[in-house]
């Protein structure tokens, strides 16, 4: 059994490879559109009343077009923001409620973060769309190493469907995992849907 130090070393090397792969991926807008078309066929996504989106930045799968689509439906869009090393969640009703925050990431405006009527408990989320540097077909995920989503995911209910979204180039055979790492129920790319609960 590998020790924690060797797992951490493997993760660091994998992060470098995956950053490069994702950065070199062309046609990100088109591939993201294809991914969300595939997601439209996922029953959990179709039935969800409250969906956690992330707002894309830099090389990530583009989410803003899909968020705009959801505004026109009956589902509730919620997005995270970081405070004190943790992710909090608020309801978003328009892209004009976002502004540039920490790390150059679009996040809810300060006045929105202070509104109790927009604060959302993670336990209310039906589907959580989770970003990452890489995933495997078993639901393993590797992020940037800050642990924000690893701390948020345990606050979701067992009934919440955790969906990793990524480009095909971000899928690897196996992600090295530690005890605190959180797993996905599904992983969706532009060409595939992996049901990780079935292995």
Image (spheres, rainbow, N blue to C red):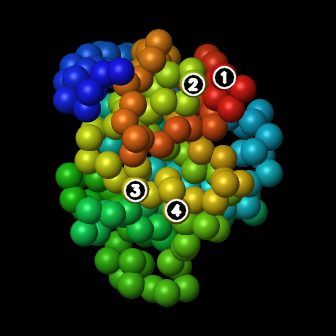
Q: Give the class, few, some or many, for how many residues have Cα within 10 Å of label 4's Cα (few <14, many ≥20).
A: some
> Residue 3: percent from the left, percent from the top?
26, 27
Q: Nearer the viewer, residue 135 or 183?
A: 183
Distance CA(mark 3)–CA(mark 2):
20 Å
Q: Give the side of residue 34 with respect to residue 169, left or right.
A: right
> Residue 45: percent from the left, percent from the top?
72, 45
- Say which residue label 2 marks: 138
Q: Are marks 2 and 1 in contact (CB under 8 Å)?
A: yes
> Residue 148: percent from the left, percent from the top?
34, 53
- Say which residue label 4 marks: 155
Q: Considering only order in the chain, which callout, 1 or 2, is on the residue closer to the N terminus? A: 2
- Say which residue label 3 marks: 151
Q: Secondary structure at mark 2?
A: loop
Q: Quadrant of residue 187?
A: top right
Distance CA(mark 2)–CA(mark 1):
5 Å
Q: Nearer the viewer, residue 56 or 9?
A: 9
Q: Considering only order in the chain, which callout, 3 or 1, is on the residue closer to the N terminus? A: 3
Residue drawn at x 50%, y 53% as measured from the top left: 153
- Say which residue label 1 marks: 199
- Name the quarter where the C terminus is drawn: top right
The answer to whether 182 is drawn above or below residue 194 in the figure is below
Q: Considering only order in the chain, which callout, 2 or 3, is on the residue closer to the N terminus? A: 2
Distance CA(mark 4)–CA(mark 2):
21 Å
Q: Nearer the viewer, residue 116 or 104?
A: 116
Can the viewer see residue 164 in this picture? yes
Q: Are marks 3 and 4 in contact (CB under 8 Å)?
A: yes
């Amino acid at each position: 059994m590998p020790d924690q130090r060797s797992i951490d070393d493997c993760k660091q090397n994998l992060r470098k490879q995956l950053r490069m792969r994702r950065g070199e991926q062309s046609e990100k807008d088109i591939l993201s559109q294809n991914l969300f078309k595939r997601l439209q066929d996922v029953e959990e996504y179709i039935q969800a009343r409250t969906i956690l989106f992330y707002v894309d930045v830099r090389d990530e799968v583009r989410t803003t077009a899909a968020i705009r689509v959801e505004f026109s439906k009956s589902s509730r869009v919620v997005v995270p923001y970081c405070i004190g090393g943790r992710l909090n969640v608020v309801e978003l009703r328009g892209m004009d409620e976002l502004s540039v925050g920490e790390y150059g990431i679009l996040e809810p405006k300060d006045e929105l973060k202070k509104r109790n009527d927009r604060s959302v408990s993670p336990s209310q989320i039906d589907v959580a769309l989770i970003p990452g540097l890489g995933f495997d077909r078993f639901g393993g995920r590797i992020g940037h190493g800050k642990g924000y989503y690893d701390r948020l995911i345990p606050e979701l209910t067992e009934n919440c469907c955790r969906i990793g979204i990524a480009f095909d180039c971000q899928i690897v055979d196996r992600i090295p995992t530690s005890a605190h790492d959180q797993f996905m129920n599904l992983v969706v790319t532009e060409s595939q849907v992996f049901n990780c609960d079935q292995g």
